[in-house]
Amino acid sequence: MLICVSSHAADNSIEIDRAQIQSSDEGYKLSASFSLDLNRGLEDSLSHGLPLYFTTDVEISRPRWFWDERAASVKQTTRISYNVLTRQYSATILGGLQQNYRTLDEALSLVRSPPRWVVADNSDLDADETYMVAVRMRLDISHLPKPFQVNAINNKDWRMSSDWKRFSFKAGR
């Protein structure tokens, strides 16, 4: 187990453990869980007051003969920050939930296991049609101040991303 965690942290990757679409009254929701560990450089930046942003991208398309018809494309970003004065971490889903935590591992739990969220309205997908879903998570440097973006582009510590996880799903009501 320790070998797996060490190699996982060393390669700066994010793994998608589980991803599925579930139908609900509010729409189609993504239920997912991820594995990730921050490298030392990211932890240092966070402890010095620089927030980290993790974005989950979801694309839903219907395969056609010559092309894929895009039915939905959404993303959700979670910000992790550290307040030096209160010595607390904060995890915020932009535009929604915010919680404070005592440890970094507790704050990362919101990134690793986000609450289910609507990725398509019921009217966006046709019932009984099969769709292809693609999901990925990445460390999103576009939310950082410009000087940090330039540094992050040239620094491998800041390149964290999962591969796209693709699966099919049949819409229902």
Image (tube, rainbow, N blue to C red):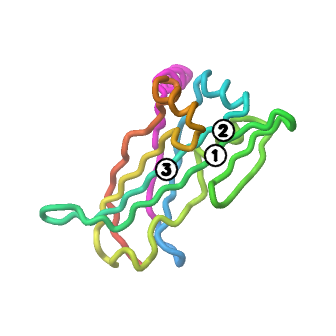
Residue 75 placement, left or right of 83:
left
Q: At label 1, which amino acid type do we have?
A: Arg
Q: Residue furthest toward the front?
A: 147
Residue 78 horizontal/vertical position (percent):
60, 49
Residue at (58%, 24%) from the top-left corner?
A: 39
Q: Which comes sooner in the sequence, label 2 or label 3? A: 2
Image depth: mark 2 or mark 3 in front: 2
Looking at the rendered image, the quarter that the N terminus falls into is: top right
Circle 2 is placed at which residue position? 51
- Tell which of 136 and 106 is nearer to you: 136
- Magenta span of residues: 1-21
Q: Looking at the image, do the residues carrying marks 2 and 1 touch, with CB atoms under 8 Å apart?
A: yes
Circle 3 is placed at which residue position? 56
Looking at the rendered image, the quarter that the C terminus falls into is: bottom left
Secondary structure under tag 2 reads: loop
Is 134 placed above or below 124 here? above
Whole-Å distance between the Cαs marked 2 and 1? 6 Å
Residue at (49%, 23%) from the top-left corner?
A: 155
Circle 1 is placed at which residue position? 79
Q: Residue furthest toward the left?
A: 66
Secondary structure under tag 1 reads: strand
Magenta highlight on residue 132: no
Image depth: mark 1 or mark 3 in front: 1
